[in-house]
Amino acid sequence: MEKVNIKEKFDLFEDRWSPKVIGEVNDAYVKAVKLKGEFVWHHHDEEDELFLVVKGSLVIKLRDRDIRLEEGEFVVIPGGVEHLPIAEEEAHVLLLEPKSTLNTGNVTDERTVAELQHI
Amino acid sequence: MEKVNIKEKFDLFEDRWSPKVIGEVNDAYVKAVKLKGEFVWHHHDEEDELFLVVKGSLVIKLRDRDIRLEEGEFVVIPGGVEHLPIAEEEAHVLLLEPKSTLNTGNVTDERTVAELQHI
């Protein structure tokens, strides 16, 4: 059981859209991910997904509106809700979601990460 | 589905050792709590508990060592592990734990909060 310094974890990698596991709590992972640009519309059938911005800002487009998150803000996207994360500039984001959650949800594309790296 | 500004939530209350629910993700709550002083030795039988310091610093005493968390650092205390949070100065802490988790775990005392407030 070791403490985790969030900033130090983000310093360990450069690649974007590839969540790294930095913590494990019950049936969920805490993941660190760097985002820039536009992801892909997707949803997670059953799983809620928490996005917490630790650096930069992030827009999460929903089908009916946008949610803009600044540093120190989070939102929980409920299971089944389609969403599209967009970051104009690089954003550092913590994710909290079940261990079973795939980053692209119901969609498979070249950014799908099936094997998560633990850092 | 509304975003949550963590600092604004902490501005809504003054009482200590009384976690407030500020988010819900799958079977877990995200809670905000202000801590100062020493809590009580306790454990949670089955449930891991994540502590993330957002302001100040926090020492979590274990039976064999201490873990000191500064801003932007977290630790996950596994189920069954006895721990004692201590904050010399007021610390603002996010907790992530199952909805079923009681703040004092296996202990009941005057700081046990059975009915959680949602803010």
Image (tube, coloured by chain):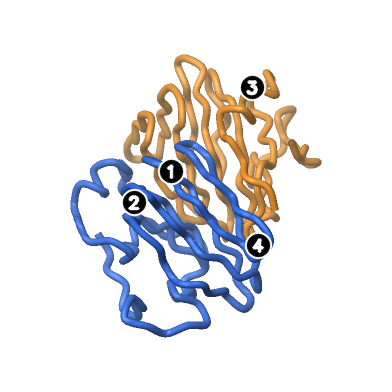
Chain colours: A orange, B blue
Choose top left, top right, bottom left or bottom right for residue B8: top left
Q: Earlier in the sequence, mark 4 or mark 3?
A: 3
Q: Helix, strand or loop at disc 1?
A: loop
Between marks 1 and 2 in the image, the one whose residue lies nearer the viewer: 1
Q: How far apart in space, not on screen, are marks 1 and 2 (Cα)?
A: 31 Å
Q: How far apart in space, not on screen, are marks 3 and 1 (Cα)?
A: 22 Å
Between marks 3 and 1 in the image, the one whose residue lies nearer the viewer: 1
Label disc, if present, on residue B1 of the rendered structure: 2
Mark 1 chain: B
Residue B37 pos. (x, y %): 35, 59
Residue B63 pos. (x, y %): 64, 66
- Residue situated in front as seen by the camera: A119 or B4: A119
Q: Amino acid at mark 4?
A: Asp
Between marks 2 and 3 in the image, the one whose residue lies nearer the viewer: 3
Q: Which residue is farthest top?
A: A89
Q: Which residue is painted at 40% across and 45% down in the image?
A: A75
Between marks 4 and 3 in the image, the one whose residue lies nearer the viewer: 3
Choose top left, top right, bottom left or bottom right for residue A8: top right
Mark 3 chain: A
In this rendering, is residue A118 above or below A14? Answer: below
Residue A109 horizontal side relative to residue A95, left or right: right
Residue A61 horizontal side relative to residue A24, left or right: left
Q: Which residue is farthest bottom?
A: B108
Residue matched to label 1: B57
Residue matched to label 3: A11
Q: Helix, strand or loop at disc 2?
A: loop
Q: Label 1 crowding class (10 Å Cα cut-off): few <14, some 14-19, many 20+?
A: many
Q: How far apart in space, not on screen, are marks 4 and 3 (Cα)?
A: 26 Å
